[in-house]
Image (tube, rainbow, N blue to C red):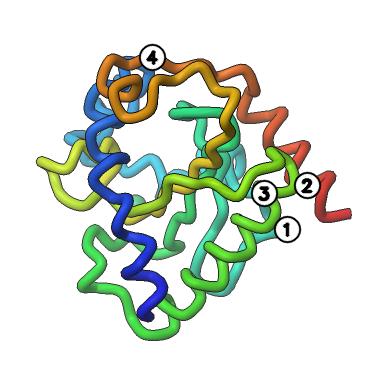
Amino acid sequence: MFSVYQIMISLNIIVVMKVHNPYRSKYNHSYHNKKCPFCNNEVVKKQNIESLEGENWMVFVNQYPILDGNVMLVLKRHVEDTSELNKNEWVELQEKIEQTKTILSKIFDTKSFNIGFNIGPDSGSSVKHLHWQIIPRVNHQPINGFAGFIAGIQNVRMSPEELKEKIEGSLQ
Ligand SMILES: [Zn+2]
């Protein structure tokens, strides 16, 4: 539990960059739509990396990545706040964070990440269904740190399909 909260220190960074990301307009629309994209079987089938699926959490490639390597841990049941998570879900979340970090560390040759939740309509979150963003950071990305995020300067080179293949390939 403790290390999960330690990781949440970076939460405020992710909130700001999502608000300013123009590529997320489709998801922004769905936030206020009654249909939840993460409860949609077609979305799950497309984004879920089945070999990383746990008892409570799925690992999605983000279809609208903030940066290369952007994956999301998505709870299987529809919940909108961390206060609704049970103990087993917290424990498995921690395991999934570490597993995903390890895989992305190898693929992107980095030890740096932005990770965290966005909760509630004013957080900048584009989907209500609780999900945890994991974004590997590498030093050659042409982003001027926090200021770059605010300005919307991004450079996504890897398609979600390519990322999914790389992750699945790393597990073989
Ligand atoms: Zn949902």
Q: Residue 121 or 115: which is nearer the viewer? A: 115
Residue at left 34%, top 20%?
A: 148
Residue type of the residue flagged with mark 4: Ile
Residue type of the residue flagged with mark 1: Ser
Q: CA distance from mark 3 to mark 2?
A: 14 Å
- Residue at numbered disc 3: 105
Q: Which mark is residue 51?
A: 1
Q: Quadrant of the C terminus?
A: bottom right
Q: Residue 2: give x, y in percent of width and height.
A: 36, 79
Badge 3 marks a residue whose secondary structure is: helix
Residue at left 28%, top 62%?
A: 79
For marks 2 and 1 on the same chain, the one whose residue lies earlier in the sequence: 1
Q: Which mark is residue 168?
A: 2
Q: CA distance from mark 3 to mark 4?
A: 23 Å
In the rendered structure, are the residues bearing label 2 and label 1 in contact, judged by CB atoms less than 8 Å apart? Answer: yes
In the rendered structure, are the residues bearing label 3 and label 4 in contact, judged by CB atoms less than 8 Å apart? Answer: no
